[in-house]
Amino acid sequence: MKGFFSRFNNIFFKVFGALSALTLIFALLLGIVFLRLYTTATQRSRQEQLIHVSNQLATRLGDTIIYGNYEEMMQFLEIYNSFESAELWYIPNGNAELSVEDEFLIIDTKIPTEQEEFVEVVRKASEGNQEASVFYSEIHKATAIVVGTPVYGANGSVYGALVSIETLEDLDDAIRSTGRMIFISAVMALLVSGLLAFLFARRITEPVRQMRLMTRDMMDGNYKLKTGISRHDEIGEMARSIDMLSDKLLENEEERKNMEQMRLDFFANVSHELRTPITVVRAYAESLVDGVVTSKEAQEDYYARILRECSNMERLVGDLLTLSKMQNPNFRIEKELVSLTQILEDAVGGVAAIAADKDIEISPSGQFDEPCMVMGDYGRLRQMFMVVFDNALKFSPEGSTIHVDVKCAGGIEVTIRDEGSGIAPEDIPNIFEKFYKSRLLENEKGSGLGLAIAKYICEKHNGTVRVESELGKGSAFTFAFGTVK
Ligand code: ADP
């Protein structure tokens, strides 16, 4: 049973049901109201006419009874006869001189004497009251108006009742044909609403079907499809939203794949970076344990190499830890009011020994002497500058200069510019990536994590970092902070 009904539970049948119910109700209401108005108006005017004629006839009938002037009476009866649908009786009260058998009276055998309304009208007229009533005459098989009019004799007494009946067959016919018309128009309305419902439902269901198919595809992970619906209504809006959703999902999917690839690359890089020093340490340690290396100098050299590899590993693991901390979206930097120039000075101090070794001068300019107060983490900001100074020193030739320029009016900008090897334009977009590093000899110890960490630190301070570089001429790293909060 449920299955049977569910077959009709679709948009077509719903629209069809609503439309046809509406048109049927409308047709019925209109028909009923029209019929009622028409019936009452017609009945009233016929009744008035009948009363008017009955009155004239009753007066004449009275005169005829008093004066015996039958000819005049006949004239009136002729007039009355012109009302084809009307019938007439005279019903004496017993004291009447005229009787039912008199020739000039139109006597019809079809007297509805059985019917209550008729009897009542006759009774009232016999008592001297004119009465009209509408009833369904069983004899005529039609609705009829009956009017009973008292006929007065010479002394003003009631002689009898003039009863006139007019059947309303034409009215009944009109009602019947109106009913037929209502029926025909209802059937037509059903057909038209069926057609409209079909067209309307198809306009709605077709795009809905398309969208349903597309969302199914999306569920299966296919985000490349488009609904292809372009309409300026709610369905069009919905289709656009679904298209946008599929775009977004496609984007997310690609991002997820990239992330996954990056994660795999990251693991591969970390393993590779750690494996190399471990292999080296192990080889040296084995040589020492096996007693292969006998001379004291060689042994000391091996120990020194093991130590160097260990500190490299320590630095790498430290960088990895810092990175994983920075990448955590919940990681918050502890900020306090610090002087950026003081941090810069501190960082310069940290690399002073290496600079001296390579005879490189670090030359400050701009507002280096001003405090340039910002809200930030002293240690992290120092680490950030150290990365850039380290690289500048690493890639600069002996005897060159590293320029440190500070601007702290409004926004703050710190530029560290070297006169070193420079970076190839195609490499510039990659230098902030994790594990991206140059294969140059001077970068032997580089892990490729420094600039990635520096960028994270800068961003955690709501800053940006940009680089300008030219191969063979040098590079300039600029850190810009709006207001460091
Ligand atoms: P690392 O220095 O450990 O290799 P970084 O992330 O600090 O890693 O730097 C990534 C790469 O960017 C370097 O290997 C180098 O190729 C390039 N680079 C960074 N700074 C400079 C610079 N001042 N001059 C030339 N190349 C640089």
Image: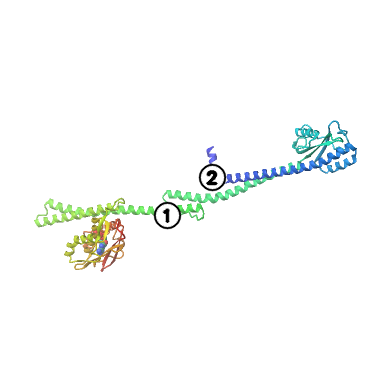
Looking at the picture, how far across and down is residue 195, in whole percent? 60, 49
User: Looking at this rendering, what residue extends furthest in the top direction?
Assistant: 94
Q: Residues within 10 Å of mark 2 (few under 14, many from 20)?
A: few
Locate ligand 1 by image quadrant: bottom left
Is 81 above or below relative to 422?
above
Q: Position of residue 442 (x, y in %)?
A: 21, 62
Residue to which mark 1 is pinned: 247
Q: Tell me the SS state at disc 1.
A: helix
Q: Secondary structure at mark 2?
A: loop
Quadrant that contains the C terminus: bottom left
Q: Is residue 435 visible?
A: no
What's under tag 1, amino acid-wise? Asp
Residue positioned 59% across, 46% down in the render: 19
Residue designated by label 2: 10
Q: Residues within 10 Å of mark 1 (few under 14, many from 20)?
A: some
Which labelled disc corresponds to residue 287?
Answer: none
Nearest the eye: 278 or 160: 160
Amino acid type at image mark 2: Asn
Which label's residue is closer to the chain start, 1 or 2? Answer: 2
Figure quadrant of the N terminus: top right
Q: Is residue 364 left or right of residue 135?
A: left
Q: Position of residue 39 (x, y in %)?
A: 72, 43
**468 over 202 or under it: above or below:** below
| Image coords of residue 281 (percent x, y) | 17, 53
In depth, the one of 458 and 123 nearer the eye is: 123
- Residue 248 visible from this viewpoint: yes
- Respond yes or no on whether mark 2 lies under 8 Å from ligand 1: no
